[in-house]
Image (spheres, grey):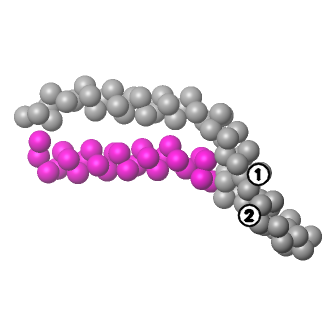
Amino acid sequence: MTEFTLLEIMKETIYLSFMVALPMLAVGTIVGVIISIIQTATSIQDQSLSFIPKLLATFATLVAFGPWMLKTMMAFTVKLLGDLQMFAR
């Protein structure tokens, strides 16, 4: 395995991790900002108020995007294991 091959695998792994995590992180951030704006507008200072909506939104995103995430990660794993013979050289 050459250094270029290893760097290419690492690049693909980081990119895949970013793409799989992005939907949940984006939804959690957007919901957090919306709840913070509502808390500021109503002068509510309860820290736990934003936790439940973010948790529910993240779970809903996981349910909605879960099949795509699983398919994407499985395709990458199958590709990596299929190329295992090439990496052993």
Q: Nearer the viewer, mark 1 or mark 2?
A: 1
Image point 42% across, 44% down: which residue?
16
- Tell me which amino acid carries mark 2: Val
Q: Is residue 76 magenta?
A: no
Q: For residue 83, which quarter of the picture?
A: top left
Image point 27% across, 44% down: which residue?
9
Give the number of the disc on residue 89.
none
Image point 60% across, 53% down: which residue?
25
Label 1, on which residue?
52
| Left or right: where 69 falls relative to 2 | right
Q: Is residue 12 above or below residue 28?
A: above
Residue segment shown in magenta: 1-26
Could you give the CA–CA distance between mark 1 and mark 2, rounded to whole angstroms? Answer: 14 Å
Q: Is residue 74 above or below residue 22?
A: above
Image point 11% across, 42% down: which residue?
1
Measuring from the top left, give residue 46's x and y in whole percent: 82, 67
| Left or right: where 15 falls relative to 69 | left
- Tell me which amino acid carries mark 1: Ile
Label 2, on which residue?
33
Measuring from the top left, give residue 37's x and y in whole percent: 81, 68
Measuring from the top left, give residue 88's x and y in whole percent: 11, 33
Measuring from the top left, give residue 29's x and y in whole percent: 66, 58
Front one among 15 and 70 = 70
What element does badge 2 sit on? helix
